[in-house]
Image: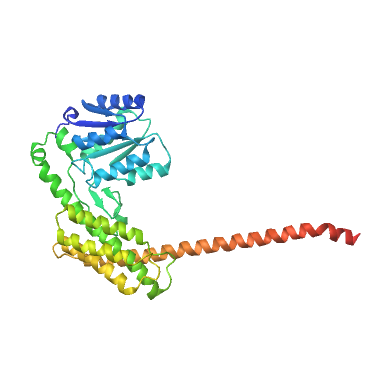
């Protein structure tokens, strides 16, 4: 087993509260880290990520949760910094399950709830060194694959990504020397899967809308704005990859979605063209590969969405009926109470 030397690794630590920052820095120092850069403002944090290449990022998320979560997503999407796969550990004082779920869903490797001991923090860091999870890519998530085996209904394969924290503390010279190629290959794999997932999201939205005609009403309107966001993201990805032909198809996709107006009563021919352009953009990007291999997953997703939306609509309808019944009963009670004195006087 390779010897771990934390002193080799560089750490970027963000915490806007200085006393908490000092506490975390002390814990990192006790673990063995020596290269620790501390920042307390979001602007300095962003600049440090962009300008340096830390092997570990530790960030407090309690006070600036939305900003931190968006920043983590930007790193994972390759929009900030040179390594989308840098190990990222979030800390928080919040025990709110919603906050912790959002922290996990933004793409961070781990979340530690304060207060924590140095021993506990070191165990979590060791896990990120020895047992870091492969990444999974969806249309709205890039990060560690936390699914259980029984939950893997998607055909998206887990992607092994670079772990420079492990390579650095174990002094793996071969991995470090091949670092740029390592990142480039993993980035290409993530981009390819991301493009496929965004194209699938557009196809699924169109399939769901088209199924209204075939199988009855689906209680949700076509979200044209979401389609446009997906199409623009598709164009951005293929442009960054230098695939101009795919970008031209994506541009046509954006125009066709714009022709749908607000999405109400979208013509079947227009929906079909949106679907074909989304698939065509991916095919042009992937050198002729298609998303046909995802046909079963698309069908399952559309079916599950229909069932979920129908169940939600039925639950809302039942709730409205119960509220109406309660209001009617209250009205009847009020009427009875108002008439009771007259009844009593008539009986006297």
How many marks the image carries: the answer is 0
Image quadrant where residue 179 sits: top left
Horizontal placement of 63 versus 13: left or right?
right
Q: Residue furthest right?
A: 348
Residue beneath the point at 20% across and 64% down: 249
Position of the C terminus by quadrant = bottom right
Q: Which residue is painted at 66% across and 62% down in the image?
A: 328
Q: Quadrant of the N terminus?
A: top left
Measuring from the top left, give residue 334's x and y in whole percent: 73, 57
Q: Is residue 72 left or right of residue 340?
A: left
Give the vertical position of 240 relative to 51 (above or below).
Answer: below
Q: Is residue 22 left or right of residue 11?
A: right
Question: Quick one: 313 or 40, which is closer to the camera?
Answer: 40
Q: Position of residue 8 (x, y in %)?
A: 16, 29
- Image location of residue 122, percent across then percent down: 27, 31
Q: How is the image coloured?
A: rainbow
């Amino acid at each position: 087993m390779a010897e771990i030397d934390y002193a080799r690794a560089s750490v970027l630590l963000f915490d806007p509260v200085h006393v908490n920052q000092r506490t975390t820095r002390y814990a990192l120092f006790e673990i063995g880290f020596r290269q620790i850069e501390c920042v307390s403002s979001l602007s300095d944090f962003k600049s440090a990520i962009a300008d340096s290449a830390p092997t570990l990022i530790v960030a407090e998320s309690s006070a600036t949760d939305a900003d931190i979560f968006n920043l983590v997503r930007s790193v994972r999407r390759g929009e900030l910094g040179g390594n989308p796969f840098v190990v990222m550990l979030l800390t928080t004082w919040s025990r709110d399950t919603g906050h912790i779920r959002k922290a996990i869903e933004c793409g961070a490797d781990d979340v530690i709830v304060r207060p924590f001991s140095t021993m506990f923090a070191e165990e979590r860091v060791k896990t990120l060194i020895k047992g870091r999870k492969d990444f999974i890519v969806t249309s709205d998530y890039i990060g560690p694959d936390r699914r259980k085996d029984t939950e893997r209904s998607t055909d998206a394969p887990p992607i092994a990504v670079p772990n420079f924290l492990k390579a650095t503390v174990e002094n793996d010279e071969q991995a470090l020397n091949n670092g740029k190629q390592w990142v480039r290959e993993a980035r290409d794999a993530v981009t390819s899967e991301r493009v496929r997932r965004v194209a699938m999201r557009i196809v699924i939205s169109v399939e769901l809308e088209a199924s209204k005609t075939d199988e009855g009403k689906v209680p949700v309107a076509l979200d044209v704005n979401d389609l446009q966001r997906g199409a623009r993201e598709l164009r951005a990805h293929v442009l960054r990859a230098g695939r101009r032909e795919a970008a031209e198809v994506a541009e046509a996709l954006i125009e066709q979605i714009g022709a749908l107006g607000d999405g109400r009563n979208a013509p079947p021919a227009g929906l079909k063209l949106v679907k074909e352009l989304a698939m065509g953009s991916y095919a042009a990007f992937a050198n002729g590969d298609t998303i046909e291999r995802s046909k079963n997953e698309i069908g399952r997703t559309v079916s599950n969405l229909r069932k979920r939306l129908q169940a939600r609509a039925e639950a809302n309808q039942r709730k409205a009926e119960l509220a109406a019944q309660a209001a009617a009963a209250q009205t009847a009670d009020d009427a009875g109470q108002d008439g009771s004195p007259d009844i009593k006087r008539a009986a006297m």
